[in-house]
Amino acid sequence: MPTTRLPSAGFSITVRVSVTADASAIGRLTMCVGEAGAVVTALDVVDSDHVRVTVDITCDTADSTHADQVVKALEVLPGVEVHKVSDRTFLLHLGGKIEVNSKVALRNRDELSRAYTPGVARVCLAIAENPADARRLTIKRNTVAVVTDGTAVLGLGNIGPAAALPVMEGKAALFKRFGGVDAWPVVLDTQDTDEIVRIVKAIAPAYGGINLEDIAAPRCFEIEERLRQELDIPVFHDDQHGTAIVVLAALTNALRVVGKRLEDVRVVVSGAGAAGTAIMKLLLRQGVGDIIAYDRLGALHRGMADMSPSWRWLAEHTNSGGYSGDLPGALRGADVFIGVSAPNLLTGDDIAAMAPNSIVFALANPDPEVDPREARKHAAIVATGRSDQPNQINNVLAFPGVFRGMLDAHAEEFTEEMALAAARAIADVVGEEKINPSVIVPSVFDPRVAPAVAAAVREAGRPSSS
């Protein structure tokens, strides 16, 4: 199903061009870029003389092919010479995005003697006598391992551990920026479930928590479950629980806007993998009216054969009417659509067939399940995973604060109560007096989010709240 992709900062380029210096030169350049479908975000004059002017044009494009088209459009413009094209995303990644810095000064022998030998030996002996002191006297108190095998990276699939590293670096940077948590990528060159569990168990003493990332379903479910049973630190699969927390927060406020209750609505979820399964389980825990889960084999229902254990569980706990048709059919009369699957599965007409005041969360990235511009013609509220659209459903609203709270509480596990508390905290940061169809979640840069989530998680982890 064809669609027009939207320009994004993720495909931003800077093109250095020289053009004949006349009154309309700059206007011709920006018009050319705009007519090519890109969005000019900056224009800087680099050099000039009496004859020509050299300009850096920075613009957002839709993808690499579109970027090439923009450059070609500039190249054929009369009087224009293209000198250099820079992909701003690749420039940002040169040399990696994170580094290690020492928290202590090592300016003289005295400081060296306390940070390292001989003084450090006394600290080692103290931890050997009381292992719990590792949380107090080492990086364990504030450090998380971001673990992946590279089998389900973004929407790119099984691209391997080395190719997954830029994502894990980014995740570590987000942990530090938004939660003050020191995180480090751990990319594993194995896709064997037993070996992954063994490796993570072996490295766990250095960390206060494990964040599993971009591991394909259904293996991710077993890996998380086994690690939770065998480790005394929290294990959190962000693709599952981070997504579920933010979706529940967004849906809480969306339902407030349209005046519906969760227990009264029918929800259709496209995608029954890691994220979709966690979303549905959290919604069921909150008492949702009914859910139809849809995946590549169709709507999950009790009569289906050859289902995985996770799909079997969903079939037994959702789809009370036994629906077995296609995705557009499932949407007819539904109140909420949540997509965590694949692009361009639906049209505006499919959204029009939903119940009045419908809610659409089309979260496939970078291209949603339905064009958000078409969806807004019929739905009361539309959210996507894109940063250039209103109502961005972004896991960064959840995981930094969740881990901040668990680390502060010295938690030994992540619980469903923590997930529900985190979702309520995110929703409440917006404030009922501030929510509207374009604002159902706070900005990822809202400084109130991570502290609110951390406080809620700490409180939920108290023994009295269990």
Image: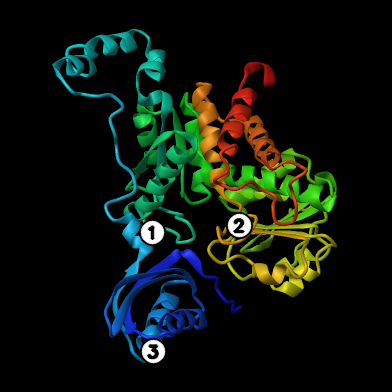
Closer to the N terminus: mark 3 or mark 1?
Answer: 3
Please identify the residue farthest to the left as the structure is shown.
109
Can you give x and y, in whole percent of width and height, for residue 100 in the image?
29, 36
Type of amino acid at the residue the image marks with label 3: Leu
Q: Secondary structure at mark 2?
A: loop
Looking at the picture, how far across and down is residue 67, in whole percent?
41, 75
What's the CA distance linking mark 2 and mark 1? 19 Å
Give residue 340's quadrant in the image: bottom right
In the image, residue 158 above or below residue 57: above
Measuring 39% from the left and 89% from the top, which residue is drawn there? 77
Q: Vertically, is 202 above or below 462?
A: below
- Which quadrant is the C terminus positioned in? top right
Mark 2 lies on residue: 340
Identify the mark nearer the N-term, 2 or 1: 1
Q: Are marks 2 and 1 in contact (CB under 8 Å)?
A: no
Q: Is residue 56 left or right of residue 309?
A: left
The amino acid type of the residue labelled 1 equals Ile
In this rendering, position of residue 348 left or right of residue 21: right
Q: Measuring 63% from the left and 23% from the top, which residue is drawn there?
A: 459
User: Which label lies toward us, 2 or 3?
Assistant: 3
Camera-nearest residue between 418 and 324? 418
Identify the mark at residue 159; answer none if there is no mark.
Answer: 1
**In the rendering, which numbered label is found on residue 77?**
3
